[in-house]
Amino acid sequence: MSEIRARRFIVPDMNKIIKQHVLTGKQWDRLHSSKRIWATAFKPAKIPYKKLGIEERDHLVFICGGIGGFAKKAIEDNHYVEYTDISDRVVNEMKRELSKHTRNRAVIRKQAAEELSVKQKKPPLIIGIEPYPLFYDPEASLLMILRILAHGRGGLIIERAEVDKKLNRPFEQYLSELSNIYDFRVEKGDTDIREHGKPSATKFSYTKIIPLESSRVKAFHDLQLINAVKDIDGLTSEELRNVTSLPDVDEVLERIDSVLRKGEKIYKRLKHTKHLEVR
């Protein structure tokens, strides 16, 4: 009897990613210990909701929430907001600032974008205001996009137009690749947003991520597999089908492997992956 040859696939290593979250959270805690950071944060006077695809009294989920100027303004304007960030200091400060004013219009919690979970009847719009840590490696970018597709009706990434675009070039290229694989559209634009107490407006660029139903199905399946093999390095094809209950498990595994290999070519690295052997 000939020996069955194992197939090796690259998948995100969620254990490595979670360990990195702890380190990143501590770094952000130190960064946001400065009062100057909070004092100089951008505080929008008015947000062009319609242009950004935000509906009246919308349900908005902010990932990598940071100082939270946009989230605070959205709460003031009667939107229901879920605010998330990885830093204890930032989350606690947001809770302190908003505790007396939210009137049940906000949920504030510590959570990484790569682990985002949302419970709602109507899918929310998922928003990242300059979520730069998610741009810098393909695993974080992929997991952010999968969470947006699986849990939201779409995504919105907003950043100041003055930012050096070289920083985001790998992400822009990778996003184009992901849009072809996961069947979502990308729309880009610019808008002026004025800050409280300043006469002139600041130009912001935005990227809309607009999914189809097939986008959600693919994203759900990929996330299900990634989470199912979190503590597994090798198994048989039958065991793989049993731990995931996915009818198209081989297709899902090949898609994840393919998108990460594309990401490796674009970013020139993979930081938080592992090889899964399937016999």
Image (cartoon, rainbow, N blue to C red):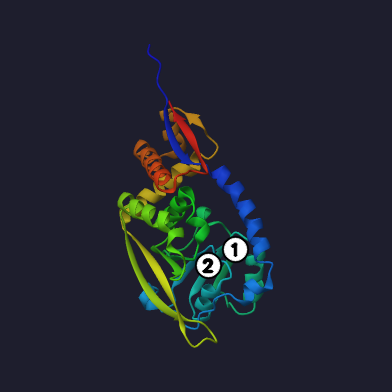
Choose between 97 and 248: the one closer to the eye.
97
Few, some or many residues within 10 Å of mark 1 (<14, 14–19, 20+): some
Q: Which residue is mark 2?
A: 82
117 sits to left or right of 19: left
Q: State yes or no: discs 1 and 2 in contact (Cβ < 8 Å).
A: yes
178 sits to left or right of 94: left
Choose between 243 and 138: the one closer to the eye.
138
The quadrant in which residue 209 appears is: bottom left
Q: Position of residue 234 (x, y in %)?
A: 49, 29
Which amino acid type is shown beneath numbered disc 1? Arg
Choose between 145 and 80: the one closer to the eye.
145
17 sits to left or right of 168: right
- The quadrant in which the N terminus is found is top left
Q: Which residue is mark 1?
A: 109
Res. 93 in view: yes
Mark earlier in primary sequence (1, 2): 2
